[in-house]
Amino acid sequence: MTSRIEDPDGRISRPSLLDISMAYGGGDAEEIDQQEIRERTLRLSPHPIDQSNPKTQISYMFYLKPLQVYEKEKPFFLNIPVHQIENARQTNVLHTLRGLLLTDLRNNEEHFSLDTSGFQVTNFHTKMQYHDFEDPRKIMDIYYKETSECIADAIGREKVHSIIPWDYQVRRRNPNLPGNSRGTPGKAQPFAAIHADQTFRAAVRRLHYFHPKEAVENAQYRTLIVNVWRPLRGPVYDYPLAVCDYRTVDPHDRVPTDIVFPDYLGETYNFWPNPKHRWYYIDAQKENEALLVKCFDSKSALDPSVAQFSPHASFPYQDQPADTPHRESIEVRTFVFLKA
């Protein structure tokens, strides 16, 4: 029963921030030679996909910066206006930019699954037209159902008891906005800070808080949160989504971070830098190619071989054509209840 599973975050002893920082030599990745990044990643986290000589590139993403303040103060972000509150801070989260090797998944999709790596590639067919994604009602009436069908096909219909789509985000990159801008509803910006959407306890809390009836009805089933991400227009050469193989993430890497809403307390994972992390993406991802990204799995608390999540973020595609269209994408967040 999901609500009775022990929260694994409470069992993790944290390494010192100095140890984390020294994993990268104490410096930011801009100072590290690209060839060194490539050789180090392949040495520390080899994978069978490397034997096929896949396309790779070096790019940059943001990790949580190892600061002494986090020894005493939990990272947080206030999703509420703070300008009228004296001495209030929107956040205490600071990031550090790191150079990373990213490997193209194309033609090697069979090496990765929701259970093992925390992500999976699948086909997605929709009746929706491009302009339909400006209509919230069509997204919820039509696209939610298509998303559920996509997940059921990818996991195996015989394994699925039920699926509840519960949120979506349309992102349309605007290069005129500041780099840290979150954009506006319907035009949210790609998010370049490495994260996982839900901690273990936050996922359980979200289910019971927002879907109490379904939480009771599905209490005996294995519970997942799966995001379905795909471009509205492809191929994508502008800030594609990158996913990290859960098998290369140390339990010490994850940092629970409070997300404070007016009526609700959420909690996500940020991540410390770790040179063992192995990152992947779909090169030139098309509209009919979807990434399933796991954000929670109740079984992971009982079986450590099962991926709990996949860290993810967008990244600047290197050497893109000058006339590259800005990224436009949609992600739908779902609860998935499995029979086993």
Image (cartoon, rainbow, N blue to C red):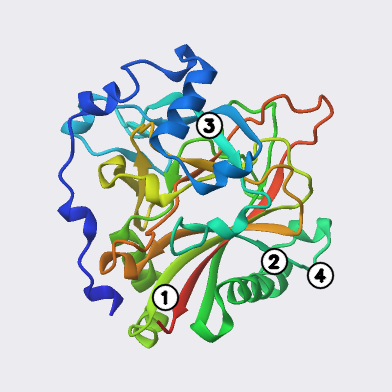
Which numbered disc, 3 or 1, marks the residue closer to the eye? 3
Q: Mark 3 sits on what residue? A: 101
Query: Which quadrant does the N terminus fall into?
Result: bottom left
Crowding at label 3, few (<14), some or many (≥20) Cα neighbours within 10 Å? many
Distance Cα–Cα, label 1 vs label 2: 20 Å
Distance from Cα at disc 2 to Cα at disc 4: 11 Å
Distance between mark 4 and mark 3 Cα atoms: 36 Å
**Residues under labels 4 and 1: Cα distance?**
28 Å
Q: Which residue is mark 2?
A: 139
- Amino acid carrying label 1: it is His
Sooner in the amino-acid sequence: mark 2 or mark 4:
4
Q: Amino acid at mark 4?
A: Lys
19 sits to left or right of 334:
left
Q: Earlier in the sequence, mark 4 or mark 1?
A: 4
Element type where label 1 sits in the image: loop
Count neighbours of disc 1 (C-alpha within 10 A) and say few if under 14, some if 14 to 19, many if 20 or more: some
In the rendered structure, which disc, 4 or 3, sits on the residue that comes first in sequence? 3
The residue where tag 4 is placed is: 127
Q: Which label sits on residue 211? A: 1
Residue plotted at (25% across, 42% down): 252
Amino acid at pointer 3: Leu
